[in-house]
Amino acid sequence: MTRGWEIQRWGGYLKATGRPQTTVEMRTYHLERLAADYDDPGAVTFDDLVEWLAAHEWAPNTRRSYRGSLRSYWSWRLATGRAAASPAHLLPPVRVPRGLPRPTPEDAYRAAIASASRDPRALMAIQLAAQCGLRRGEIARARREDLEPALIGYTLRVEGKGGHIRMVPLPDPLAATIVRAPAGWLFPSPHGKHLTPHHLGKIVVKHLPDGYTTHTLRHRCGTVSYGATRDLRAVQELLGHAKPETTAIYTKIDEAAVRAAMNAAAA
C-alpha cells in the first residue's frame, strides 16, 4: 500500500516543474520500490534509507540515481509541509568510477548493418545509434516530424536527458529513409505509441554479437567521430552530454596514438 506516500502527487509536482516524462516515471518507480518496504513515509529514518540502499546490489550509476530520487522526494515533502525534516538529506554521495570506452568493433558493426539489411526498422535503429550517437530511448521516441532541413542536409530534433533538445545531423541515406517513412513514430508499437527503449534494444541486439548493445553502438559513434575530427566539443554536442568529461568516456583513443605519446616522452 503506497497511498500515504502520495507518490503520484509528487510525480505531478515533478511534471509541473518541467521534468521529462521519462524522468518522472523513473523517479516515481524508485519511490514505489521503497514504499513497498515501508508503510509510512513519516516513520522512515536516515538509518532506514542507508540500510535500504545498502541492501541492493546496484551498479554505481543506478545507486546514485536512487539516492537522487530519495533526496528529491523528501525535499518535496519538506517544502510542502508534509515533513518536518528530511531523512534523505545526509545520504552519502555515491562514488561512480570512471568508465572505459567500449565501442562496438567495426567488423561487428558492419556485420550488423548487413544482417539488418532486410529489416528496415532494425537497420534504422542501428544507424541512429552507431552513426548519430542516439540513446536507445531517443531512438524509440523519434518521429518523422522531428526531421528538419538544415543548411547542409537534414537534422533530427532529439529530446535527450533532462528534456534538453539538440539537433543531430543525419547522413543523407538515413535522412532519405526517414523522409519516406509514414508520419508519426519511426518505431511505433502495436498500441499506437512508440516502442519502449527496452523493446527497441532487443531488436538491435539480435544483429550484434553477445555483449554488444545500442549503448556500445553509441560508444562506436563517439570513438569514430573523435578519431576523425579530434574535436571533443563537437562530439559532446553530437552525443548530447552536459560535460566533456562524460564524452571522454565514450571516445576510445587509438592505441597507436597512446604509444606515440609514450615514445615521445621516452625519447
Image: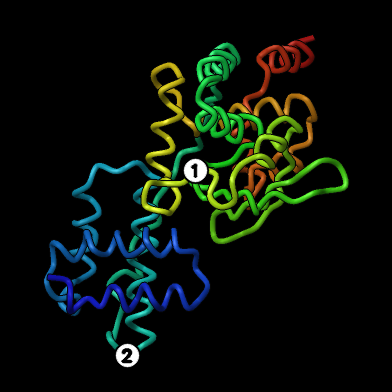
The image quadrant that residue 134 belongs to is: top right
Residue linked to disc 1: 187
Q: Nearer the viewer, residue 228 or 63?
A: 228
Label 1 to label 2, Cα distance in Å?
Answer: 43 Å
In the image: residue 235, left or right of residue 185: right
Q: Nearer the viewer, residue 209 or 143?
A: 143
User: Could you say where residue 129 lies in the image, as x and y percent from the top left?
Assistant: 58, 34
Label 1 element class? loop
The image quadrant that residue 260 belongs to is: top right
Quarter of the C terminus within the rendering:
top right
Looking at the image, is 114 positioned above or below residue 151?
above
Label 2 element class? loop
User: Could you say where residue 62 lies in the image, as x and y percent from the top left?
Assistant: 36, 48
Looking at the image, is 221 positioned above or below residue 55?
above
Residue linked to disc 2: 81
User: Could you say where residue 262 lies in the image, as x and y percent from the top left?
Assistant: 71, 15
The image quadrant that residue 43 belongs to is: bottom left
Quarter of the N terminus within the rendering:
bottom left
User: Could you say where residue 108 lies in the image, as x and y percent from the top left?
Assistant: 53, 14
Number of the label disc, if any, that sits on residue 233: none
Badge 2 amino acid? Gly
Category of crowding for the residue at label 2, using alpha-carbon neighbours closer than 10 angstroms: few (below 14), some (14–19), many (at least 20): few
Please tell me whether mark 1 or mark 2 is closer to you in this view.
1
Badge 1 amino acid? Phe
Q: Residue at x 51, y 37 (%)?
A: 98
Q: Nearer the viewer, residue 228 or 18?
A: 18
Q: Which residue is drawn at 65% across and 31% down?
A: 131
Numbered marks: total: 2
Q: Residue at x 76, y 33 (%)?
A: 172
